[in-house]
């Protein structure tokens, strides 16, 4: 198995933090440490967390920090080896056969030609294995793929070699840096988990989300941004089938800004609730039960001089109406 | 962490985590040692992040890790070596607090993962409380003959359930799609003309089954039978999740996973605290949706509920829970043993409230009725008209 020497330019945790900042991603040291270890130990990094917390971004940051390519394999139910690994270029094979129709070469020779590397369509996994320079291979939403595919993936991640019957075994020139993400819609196998380093990304804290809002929606005023983030912290404590993530916070901030709102009030939230709740029943439930109490809590708590620390959020959340 | 003997300390720490159920072996301990050479070992936060990255492998591991890490640092601080620069105050805990902490951590893990509600009940609720009847019955008292006969039938049924069309392909003589790769290869023999088309066919694929069995007082005479039903399906299929409920919901997938049926039943009996108590179907289904719904339900999932519909709880909760369940699952089957008794009409309030959200309403009172159930477990959700017809025929048919 080929080893992957780290690029000489790679600057460790500080550099990862820099790249994160450049990309507008507000990150903590723990995240940077995990990315760093995945690079230096050359082990795949499994990232879990709820939808919309920025798991996929991490792979992009990693590629950027290493100055290398990002190859992405999006998983879905029914994803098979043909789509993930390789397929033959049938049109091109057909054309070659036609061109050689008149030639007297034996069939074995012709066959050998059309089943050679130039006729191979490389799908993400094969691309990653045959790349000249170790790329970052992002295997996105691996929990959506079937268990059979997971087993196949485990094999590839163990050996970094694949065998193609017509050509033989192809071994990685450079071991790719691998990032897997999962939304936990299905439990992954222990074997795959053991193969990987692990990083859990939680919903952001109040402070972190506030920084994200300010950096992505710079035109927003301080008070509104604080109220939005406080609202988000509280709304995530109520039982919803789709808990809003960072993307929803940003959409909502932009929407409130476009409506020229200076602060949160029940009417403004009511009008823009669709940015937060993407599920009809959630929408109805929040509107009927939680909207007014949360807006009240956010407004009466006022500007947070001491920050919205977790204890304060927990105590406010405890005062919200209990689910029926 | 005692800087004096890093290797021994990390090994000890890793072993402790393994003792708490984390996926830690020699390879992980090796990785941890390498990881510590790659971070600033004087920085406690970085050390913690590094060890966490290596030693944990799923979300429920995290609180266990944090707990053990704190404990480990506290012990190191109590020993001769100087403590690492402390980034937070909670690092200083005496070893005597450890046992209580462990228990608390376990509790928080269960809350966090929503995975194992049973041990919690076990500890905090006395076995015989006047409010809730938690009389325990010995599951293992089943006659071996019954068990064998029923299990055999259930195995048959279960194998039928286990097949469903999938997008994954396999070569076949007759199929639905042209296998281009093989066709092309064969065509070489004929100078490149695709004289013969080779096919591939959809490969069968298991569907997921979620079983929710009512084991409350009103269902008592059927519950033994139903638990066997659950068990047999569990045994024949890889992807079955089983739950028992009465006033609360208990996940028994793991308990029923045991090879030996006697110990499996004993284990399930031990886990269900309110066998033969009252029934809160709505609340139980709601708990299921909240804790397990996102992970277990998808359009390929068939949900089978076994209950008579005698709900002593709030009907609105039941309706909400059924609506949510049906929206996510591929198919909802309600088995009501009372449907087998002559002249039964689904008039209990709970039953009539739940019925609009049920795709198939059938009985489960006998081996024969279970055999009939088999056809419902095939294929996708029927059209509304077909469903109405099915329901009518089922309701009428079993009276005779």
Image (cartoon, coloured by chain):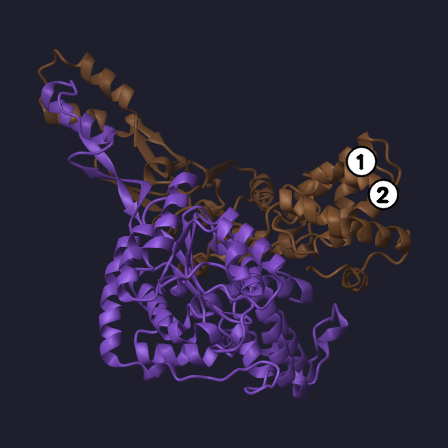
- Gap between marks 1 and 2 measured at Cα: 9 Å
Question: In terms of image quadrants, where is residue B120?
Answer: bottom right
Disc assigned to residue A256? 1
- Report whether mark 1 lies on the same chain as mark 2: yes
- x and y percentages locating residue B299 in the rendered image: 44, 46
Q: Is residue A248 left or right of residue A41?
A: right
Q: Is there a contact, CB below 8 Å, between mark 1 and mark 2?
A: yes
Which is nearer the eye, A190 or B123? B123
* Position above or below: B189 against B125: above
Assess disc 1: are there few (<14), some (14-19) or many (≥20) residues with their C-alpha within 10 Å of its C-alpha. many
How packed mark 2 is, by other alpha carbons closer than 10 Å (few <14, some 14-19, many 20 or more), is many
Of all chains, the one bearing label 1 is A
Name the quadrant of the C terminus of chain B.
bottom left
Rendered image quadrant of residue B129: bottom right
Residue depicted at 30% across the width and 77% down the height: B260
Chain painted in purple in the figure: B
Marking on residue B146: none
Q: Earlier in the sequence, mark 1 or mark 2?
A: 1
User: Which residue is labeled 2 in the image?
Assistant: A264
Q: Colour of chain A?
A: brown
């Amino acid at each position: 198995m080929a080893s992957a020497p780290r690029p000489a330019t790679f600057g460790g945790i500080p550099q990862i933090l820099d790249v994160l900042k450049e990309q507008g991603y507000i990150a903590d040291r723990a995240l940077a440490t995990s990315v760093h270890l995945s690079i230096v130990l050359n082990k795949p990094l499994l990232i879990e967390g709820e939808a919309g917390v920025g798991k996929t971004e991490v792979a992009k940051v990693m590629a950027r920090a290493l100055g290398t390519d990002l190859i992405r394999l999006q998983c879905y139910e029914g994803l098979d080896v043909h789509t993930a690994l390789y397929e033959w270029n049938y049109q091109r094979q057909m054309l070659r056969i036609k061109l050689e129709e008149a030639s007297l070469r034996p069939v074995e020779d012709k066959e050998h030609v059309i089943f050679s590397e130039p006729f191979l369509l490389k799908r993400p996994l094969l691309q990653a294995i045959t790349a000249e320079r170790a790329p970052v291979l992002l295997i996105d939403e691996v929990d959506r793929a079937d268990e059979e595919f997971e087993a196949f993936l485990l094999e590839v991640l163990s050996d970094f070699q694949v065998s193609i019957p017509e050509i033989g075994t192809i071994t990685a020139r450079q071991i790719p840096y691998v990032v897997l993400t999962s939304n936990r819609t299905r439990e992954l196998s222990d074997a795959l988990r053991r193969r990987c380093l692990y990083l859990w990304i939680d919903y952001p804290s109040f402070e972190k989300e506030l920084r994200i809002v300010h950096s992505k929606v710079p035109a927003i005023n301080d008070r509104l941004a604080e109220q939005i983030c406080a609202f988000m912290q509280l709304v995530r404590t109520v039982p919803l089938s789709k808990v809003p993530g960072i993307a929803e916070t940003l959409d909502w901030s932009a929407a409130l800004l476009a409506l020229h709102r200076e602060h949160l009030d029940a009417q403004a939230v009511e009008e823009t609730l669709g940015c937060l709740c993407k599920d009809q029943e959630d929408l109805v439930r929040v509107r009927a039960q939680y909207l007014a109490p949360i807006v009240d809590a956010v407004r009466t708590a006022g500007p947070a001089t001491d920050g919205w620390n977790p204890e304060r959020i927990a105590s406010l959340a405890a005062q919200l109406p209990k689910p029926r | 962490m005692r800087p004096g003997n890093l290797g021994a300390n990390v090994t000890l720490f890793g072993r402790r985590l393994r003792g708490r159920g984390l996926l830690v072996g020699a390879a992980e301990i090796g990785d941890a040692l390498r990881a510590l050479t790659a971070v600033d070992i004087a920085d406690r936060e970085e050390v913690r992040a590094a060890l966490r990255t290596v030693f944990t492998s799923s979300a429920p591991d995290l609180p266990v890790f944090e707990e053990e890490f704190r404990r480990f640092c506290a012990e190191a601080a109590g020993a001769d070596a100087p403590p690492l620069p402390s980034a937070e105050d909670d690092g200083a805990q005496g070893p005597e607090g450890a046992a209580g902490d462990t228990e608390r951590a376990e509790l928080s893990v269960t809350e966090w993962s929503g995975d194992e509600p049973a041990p919690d009940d076990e500890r905090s609720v006395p076995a015989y409380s006047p409010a809730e009847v938690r009389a325990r019955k010995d599951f293992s008292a089943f006659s071996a003959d019954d068990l064998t006969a029923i299990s055999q039938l259930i195995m048959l049924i279960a194998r039928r359930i286990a097949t469903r069309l999938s997008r994954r392909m396999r070569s076949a003589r007759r199929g639905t799609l042209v296998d281009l790769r093989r066709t092309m290869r064969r065509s070489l023999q004929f100078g490149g003309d695709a004289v013969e088309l080779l096919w591939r066919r959809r490969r069968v694929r298991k569907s997921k089954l979620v079983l929710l069995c009512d084991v409350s007082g009103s269902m008592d005479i059927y519950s033994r039978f139903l638990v066997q039903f659950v068990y047999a399906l569990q045994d024949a299929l890889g992807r079955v999740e089983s739950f028992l409920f009465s006033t609360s919901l208990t996940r028994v997938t793991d308990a029923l996973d045991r090879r030996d049926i006697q110990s499996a039943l004993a284990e399930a009996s031990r886990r269900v605290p309110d066998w033969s108590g009252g029934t809160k179907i709505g609340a139980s289904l709601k708990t299921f949706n909240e804790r397990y719904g996102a992970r277990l339900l998808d359009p390929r999932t068939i949900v089978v509920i076994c209950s008579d519909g005698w709900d002593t709880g709030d009907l609105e909760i039941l309706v909400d829970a059924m609506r949510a369940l049906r929206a996510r699952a591929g198919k909802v089957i309600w088995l009501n043993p009372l449907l087998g008794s002559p002249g039964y009409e689904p008039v209990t309030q709970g039953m009539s409230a739940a019925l609009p959200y049920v795709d198939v309403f059938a009985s489960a009172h006998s081996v024969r009725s279970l055999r009939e159930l088999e056809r419902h477990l095939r294929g996708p959700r029927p059209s509304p008209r077909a469903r109405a017809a099915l329901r009518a025929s089922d309701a009428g048919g079993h009276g005779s």
